[in-house]
């Protein structure tokens, strides 16, 4: 009864000739898109833009795209990455424009560079995050941050697909501080946190850090925080300058209660 | 107009799949509020993921937004998690485009592909701050119009509607728009009633309040009559001719959220005259009007360019019945060779599936699912429903599919058809085994599969079965259980045959809503007040609630749930939709009903595309005609096609009614309106109003 494994008709897929690394942002209302939503949108944008994307073989060929670890649904980002394999070499700046034009507003291409064969996960070892806490006083937040950083270990719980997990939220955090530059400009109660967090398993996300802050200092913002990933990079780059340069938008922008558009700080004023 | 988005945004992290509420889809449009004179909110009364691919809504959205001074936005049902938060924070039902409250629009146009959206209409009205009953609405409220297939009997929701539009929506929405514009410019003479009168007289809109219904002591309808001058005795459906002139949607919406149909769709023809007696869609969308090969090619290309979808669906009620389906399939497969673009026909008639289609649909490596709908298990019952396909046709079709690389086919059936016996249903098990056997033999493989999908038949208005007694739920469930047992009995086939079914209870409610009259509005309202929502979803649907509310709301009336569903109607009974005209000759329908249940065996009805016939009455009544090919045109390679421009359909083309399209090459429905409840395959729609 055994048959040779069926082979799809037609020529085999063309091999990749170039790998491009795309940095894109998830802004405004698009922060509510899930990773799967974003991946579908990018796949379609690649097709719409007519880029010579490489496909896998088999009966169900799919485009060769590989993503960095995505921000959770509801979290904005200025630094998501996808590597795209192309069957013919293209000019990165041109790809940037074509891809950006083909994506829905709010999913915005920031930069396209030639990528070595390096694996995204190996090169992106930590993230810088900005968290806006509506209705929180700056001094209370600053005190909570100090308590957090002073602690050796803070176990938090999060329900995941595999059930409730309990893990340490402290070890992954490199820095956690109140953004004092934002405090002056704030009239209503709103505090901005900045943190640099190492990518670990299990992943420690900003909401885990917030859960830990609640535990150690009773910090409980009255409305959902607005979280943005500002940058990703290799370990050791967080010493100061590196991440700052990637950050877009004014620190206080997330405190505008109105539209997420304000949060993008003019980077994409036209979007929302 | 103020957007509610700023107030909505903080709530979104607290709900499931928040991206469905933010809008911003590729190809969506946001026009300036103040520049528009007439503003439409188009609603699909189901979840966003079901509503957003709906072709009807997409077509009207584009047709309206293309017009100067006209604006259309979309709104969908919000899930109960957001509904609760919206109530708590006093956020009204909003459009996803600009997040404007629906109450601010001139028209709220709601598309009902199925009756199970009725409770969702009430949620939207209530959230929107619009009085549920049309009679309670004032000058500041929008005109609430229903469209879609269910609007051919809008009586159960007549109380909640200002109007209903039957049939194709493309021209109807423009006519309505023009009358609203004139009425507004004239200073809104005679207020709301003035506008409704204009719509009834000038745009073929059915306005329920202009008609009185009287009942007999036994509960049947005595008479339906207009209660004011100018309102016509019967309201006719709208029919768009020359579909090549209406190539919408040009730029299909591409949602960021996942939807039930992740593909670009092109309607290759509208209408179906196969004459399947259960099929409402096939009866109310007559006559057949094809798009030409060239227009289809242009629309496919425009759709792919505008969306980036990897699959193109060639939609219609029976896509392989297009007079040039082989040319279309081959032309498209040639064009898109090597681009990883898949081609799909939503469902294919077994006697129309052929080698060319099998080759072309699988040529690009991507095989979408293949679905055949024999509908009935025995030859006898297939005669009763006039679905004249043989078991040999079916075996030939699946064999071809399996040998062309498909590993799985889906087979649709119905249970509870008129005159059906247990044996008719059990015959399905034998067919499924024969299918697997043929597939194994043809391929030498053991890993081929078929899935039997079956649901309860619901008699629908404007079909020969509109008089039929609906099969009761216990009988349906008993037959389904017996079929399931029979399918599992033979261990040699167990894993090769999947079995999916929908139990009989939801179909009874669908039956109540499909053939109900104005008294059923009380039941719908009671169910909604009791928390009824999303009745098309098994996790929300509660038969018990419907049963209880029906008993309470109809107490004191000579009618009840069984009266509306499992009761056979007589020739002389006035049906609730008799004053609404789909063009079908009532005598013809009755004769067809009698032919179906003739104890000597059912009589066959031919397809008028191939056997000239005007007996159903639609063409003479509506002034329409069959528009089919062949045009003889072929699809040119893309570089040339781009400049070739519009359809070059010759004289021999479209209007050759009954032009002996010698290549009888039929096919079949896919997602007709009579698909089992709780399957969301129906998001296709026909540009039916909103």
Image (cartoon, rainbow, N blue to C red):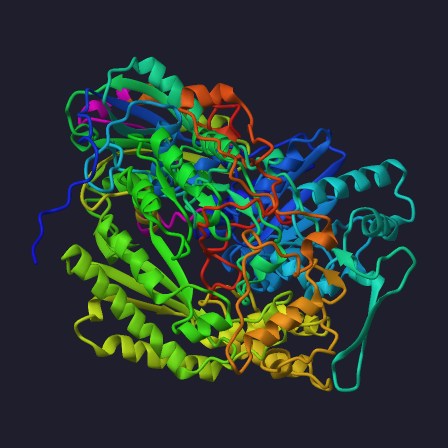
Q: Which residues are magenta?
A: A215-242
Q: Position of residue A194 (x, y in %)?
A: 35, 32
Against A217, residue A56 (above or below) is above
Residue depicted at 58% across the width and 81% down the height: B566
Q: How many marks?
A: 0
Q: Is residue B320 left or right of residue A2?
A: right
Q: Give the image quarter of residue B447.
A: bottom left
Q: Give the image quarter of residue A40.
A: top left
Residue nearer the viewer, B313 or B601: B601
Q: Position of residue B80 (x, y in %)?
A: 52, 60
Against B424, residue A53 (above or below) is above
Q: Is residue B285 left or right of residue B640?
A: right
Residue depicted at 63% across the width and 41% down the height: B60
Residue nearer the viewer, B155 or B586: B586
Q: Position of residue A269 (x, y in %)?
A: 52, 23
Q: Position of residue B551 (x, y in %)?
A: 63, 83
Q: Is residue B133 magenta?
A: no
Res A223 visible: no
Q: Is residue B428 left or right of residue A204?
A: right
Residue nearer the viewer, B574 or B320: B320
Residue depicted at 34% across the width and 31% down the height: B334
Res B25 visible: yes
Residue depicted at 66% across the width and 37% down the height: B64
Q: Is residue A236 magenta?
A: yes
Quadrant (top left/top right/bottom left/bottom right) for the N terminus of chain B: top right
Against B330, residue B515 (above or below) is below
Residue nearer the viewer, B624 or B127: B624
């Amino acid at each position: 009864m055994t048959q040779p494994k069926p082979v799809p008709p037609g020529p085999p897929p063309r091999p990749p000739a170039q790998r491009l690394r795309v940095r894109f942002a998830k802004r405004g209302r698009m922060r509510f898109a899930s990773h799967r939503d974003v991946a579908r949108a990018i796949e379609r944008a690649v097709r719409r833009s007519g880029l010579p994307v490489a496909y896998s073989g088999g009966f169900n060929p799919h485009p060769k795209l590989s993503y960095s670890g995505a921000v959770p649904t509801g979290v904005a980002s200025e630094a998501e990455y996808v590597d795209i394999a192309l069957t013919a070499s293209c000019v990165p700046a041109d790809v940037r424009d074509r891809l950006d034009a083909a994506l829905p507003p709010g999913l915005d291409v920031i930069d396209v560079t030639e990528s070595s064969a390096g694996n995204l996960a190996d090169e992106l070892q930590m993230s810088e995050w900005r968290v806006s806490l509506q209705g929180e006083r700056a001094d209370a937040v600053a005190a909570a941050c100090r308590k957090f950083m002073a602690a050796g270990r803070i176990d938090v719980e999060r329900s995941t697909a595999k059930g409730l997990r309990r893990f340490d939220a402290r070890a992954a955090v490199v820095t956690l501080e109140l953004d004092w530059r934002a405090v002056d400009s704030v009239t209503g109660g709103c505090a901005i946190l900045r943190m640099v967090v190492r990518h670990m398993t299990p992943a420690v996300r900003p909401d885990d850090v917030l859960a830990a802050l609640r535990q150690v200092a009773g910090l409980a913002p009255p409305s959902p925080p607005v979280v943005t990933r500002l940058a990703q990079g290799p370990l050791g780059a967080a010493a100061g300058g590196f991440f700052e340069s990637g950050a877009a938008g004014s620190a206080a922008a997330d405190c505008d209660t109105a539209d997420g558009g304000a949060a993008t700080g003019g980077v994409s004023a036209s979007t929302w | 107009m103020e957007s509610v988005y700023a107030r909505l945004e903080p709530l979104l992290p607290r709900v499931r799949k928040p991206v469905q509420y933010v809008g911003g889809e590729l190809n969506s449009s946001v026009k300036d509020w103040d520049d528009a004179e007439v503003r439409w909110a188009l609603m699909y009364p189901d979840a966003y993921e079901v509503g957003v691919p709906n072709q009807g809504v997409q077509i009207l959205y584009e047709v309206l937004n293309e017009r100067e001074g006209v604006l259309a936005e979309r709104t969908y049902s919000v899930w109960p998690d957001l509904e609760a938060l919206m109530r708590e924070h006093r956020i009204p039902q909003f459009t996803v485009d600009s997040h404007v409250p629906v109450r601010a629009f001139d028209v709220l146009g709601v598309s009902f592909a199925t009756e199970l959206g009725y409770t969702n209409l009430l949620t939207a009205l209530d959230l929107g701050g619009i009085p549920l009953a049309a009679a309670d609405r004032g000058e500041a409220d929008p005109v609430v119009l229903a469209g879609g297939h269910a609007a051919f009997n809008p009586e159960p929701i007549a109380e909640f509607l200002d109007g209903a539009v039957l049939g194709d929506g493309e021209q109807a929405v423009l006519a309505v728009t023009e009358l609203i514009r004139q009425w507004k410019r004239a200073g809104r003479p005679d207020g709301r009633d003035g506008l409704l009168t204009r719509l009834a007289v000038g745009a073929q809109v059915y306005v329920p309040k202009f008609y009185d219904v009287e009942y007999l002591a036994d509960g049947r309808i005595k008479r339906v009559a207009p209660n004011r001058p100018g309102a016509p005795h019967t309201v006719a459906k709208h029919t768009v001719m020359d579909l090549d002139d209406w190539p919408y949607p040009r730029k299909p919406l591409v949602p960021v959220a996942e939807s039930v149909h992740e593909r670009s769709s092109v309607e290759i023809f509208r209408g179906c005259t196969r004459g399947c007696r259960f099929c409402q869609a096939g009866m109310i969308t007559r006559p057949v009007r094809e798009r030409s090969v060239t227009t289809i090619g242009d629309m496919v290309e425009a759709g792919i360019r505008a969306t980036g979808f990897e699959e193109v669906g060639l939609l219609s009620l029976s896509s392989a019945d297009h007079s040039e389906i082989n040319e279309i399939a081959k032309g498209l497969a040639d064009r898109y060779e090597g681009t990883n673009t898949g081609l799909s026909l939503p469902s294919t008639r077994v006697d129309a599936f052929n080698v060319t289609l099998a080759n072309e649909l699988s040529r690009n490596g991507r095989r979408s699912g293949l679905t055949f709908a024999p509908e009935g298990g025995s030859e006898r019952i297939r005669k009763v429903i006039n679905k004249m396909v043989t078991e040999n046709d079916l075996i030939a079709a699946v064999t071809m599919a399996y040998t062309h690389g498909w590993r799985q086919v889906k087979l649709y059936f119905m249970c509870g058809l008129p005159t059906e016996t247990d044996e008719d249903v059990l015959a399905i098990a034998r067919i499924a085994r024969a299918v697997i056997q043929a597939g194994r033999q043809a391929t030498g493989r053991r890993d081929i599969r078929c899935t039997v999908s079956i649901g309860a038949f619901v008699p629908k208005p404007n079909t020969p079965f509109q008089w039929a007694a609906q099969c009761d739920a216990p009988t349906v469930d008993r037959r389904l259980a017996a079929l399931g047992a029979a399918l599992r009995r033979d261990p040699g086939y167990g894993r090769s045959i999947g079995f999916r079914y929908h139990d009989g209870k939801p179909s009874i409610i669908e039956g109540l809503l499909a053939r109900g009259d104005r008294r059923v509005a009380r039941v719908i309202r009671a169910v909604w007040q009791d928390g009824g929502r999303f009745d098309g979803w098994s996790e929300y649907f509660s038969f018990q609630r419907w049963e209880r509310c029906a008993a309470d709301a109809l107490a004191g009336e000579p009618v009840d749930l069984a009266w509306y569903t499992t009761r056979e109607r007589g020739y002389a009974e006035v049906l609730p939709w008799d004053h609404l005209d789909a063009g079908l000759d009532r005598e013809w329908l009755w004769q067809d009903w009698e032919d179906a249940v003739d104890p000597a065996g059912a009589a066959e009805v031919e397809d008028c595309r191939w056997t000239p016939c005007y007996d159903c009455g639609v063409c003479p009544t509506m002034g329409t005609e069959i528009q089919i090919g062949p045009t003889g045109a072929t699809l040119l390679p893309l570089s040339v096609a781009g400049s070739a421009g519009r359809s070059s359909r010759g004289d021999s083309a479209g209007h050759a009614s009954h032009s002996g399209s010698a290549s009888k090459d039929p096919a079949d429905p896919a997602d007709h309106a009579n698909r089992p409840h709780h399957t969301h395959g129906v998001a296709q729609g026909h540009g039916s109003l909103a």
